[in-house]
Amino acid sequence: MNQDSTVVGLDVHKKQITVAVLSPGAVRPDEVLTIENHAQAIVRLAKRLTSTSAAVFVYEAGPCGYEVQRQLHHLGCRVVIIAPGLTPIRPGDRVKTDRRDAEKLARLYRAGELTEIRVPTREEEAARDLVRAREDALADRLRARHRLSKFLLRQGRVYHATTWSKSHHAWLRQQRFELSLAQQTCDAYLRALEEAEARLESLNTQVLALAHTPAYAARIQALRCLKGIDTLSAVTLVAETQEFQRFPDARAYMKFTGLVCSEDSSGDKIRCGAITKAGNAHLRRILVEASWSYARRNTTGPTISKRRHGCPTAVVQIARRAQDRLHRKFWRLIQRNKLRQVAVVAVARELAGFVWAITREVPTAPAA
């Protein structure tokens, strides 16, 4: 780590930023102050600290996003964003304040103990937010369905055919109650469901349009060759990961998804536990959902064949190898009396590796 630069630890909040300035060669910060989280205050701070020597600004990724990083970067400052889950924590340290957090960031960065993350561009962040908005709408529709169906169940109204089909929706709109309050409740729940479905349909259309843009089309088409991954799932994988090339190997990408096993080994004892979950939860959900398809028969139907048509030969070969290997892996684990959920997570971990391998075969187009 460069000892000649001033390290500035920032604890960023919505209204204020706590700043700890660690001078070159110093052991403890020689200045700690609090400023408003406002563009003008940030500009004044940056100009003052960089007027005499170089400075590196360090803060953890959080709910405030990357706006502070972009403001400082626009001023020509070097800014490092840190992964919060990988920041070292002393077991006996039970005191947490903004001042101590800022000081700790400055000291740990000077010692080289922090893990830097990649900052997405505004275009990449906008695409990721769109995909996450669709996931939120999907969750809202599920909640609306549960509220309506459970209300009807309490009233003794049960639909005995396939639920959430066109006929089921027609049956829901036909429900009438003698009490006006009960009817108002049913109408409110039904209206909330229809609004959630309309919002989800609109977002699905926008995400599908995103999938055909030059920056995403080639990678999404290649990922659709994998069994269990279609357009919406592929868009999520690409939007959440963006630059696959930053991962040197498949295992590094598996770690990014949080699907690798935790470990607590000492001496000659090796203990492997549950998955770490120290990664992107959106990627992890998509991969686990896709992995359930490998529990079914290992056949290549017309749908997958159509998706693979016209794709590079190397991509299709990787997809076929993944299909055979992951199907065998799932049933091999089942035969060893593993729970189906455990087997699916193990398959999802290897599926992440095949996703990484496929994207390496596809050139990345520049974002628009």
Image: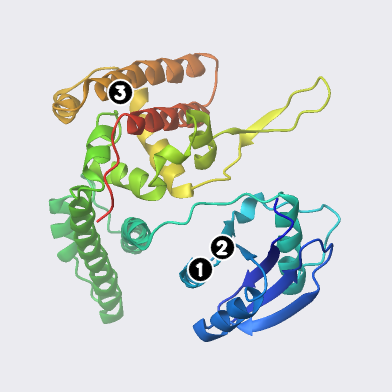
Disc 2 marks which residue?
78
Disc 1 marks which residue?
76
Q: Amino acid at mark 2?
A: Arg
10 Å neighbourhood of mark 3: few (<14), some, or many (≥20)?
many
Per the model, the C-alpha gap separating discs 2 and 3 is 41 Å
Q: Which quarter of the figure has residue 29? A: bottom right
At which x and y percent is residue 24? 76, 63
Identified at 75% across, 77% down, the residue is: 32
Is residue 138 visible to us here? no
Q: Helix, strand, or loop for circle 2?
A: strand
Q: Helix, strand, or loop for circle 1?
A: loop
10 Å neighbourhood of mark 2: few (<14), some, or many (≥20)?
some
Q: Which of the marked residues, 2 or 3, is nearer the chain's N terminus?
A: 2
Identified at 40% across, 44% down, the residue is: 243
Nearest to the observer: residue 330 or residue 262: 262
Q: Amino acid at mark 3?
A: Ala
Disc 3 marks which residue?
319
Give the mark toward the camera: 2 or 3.
2
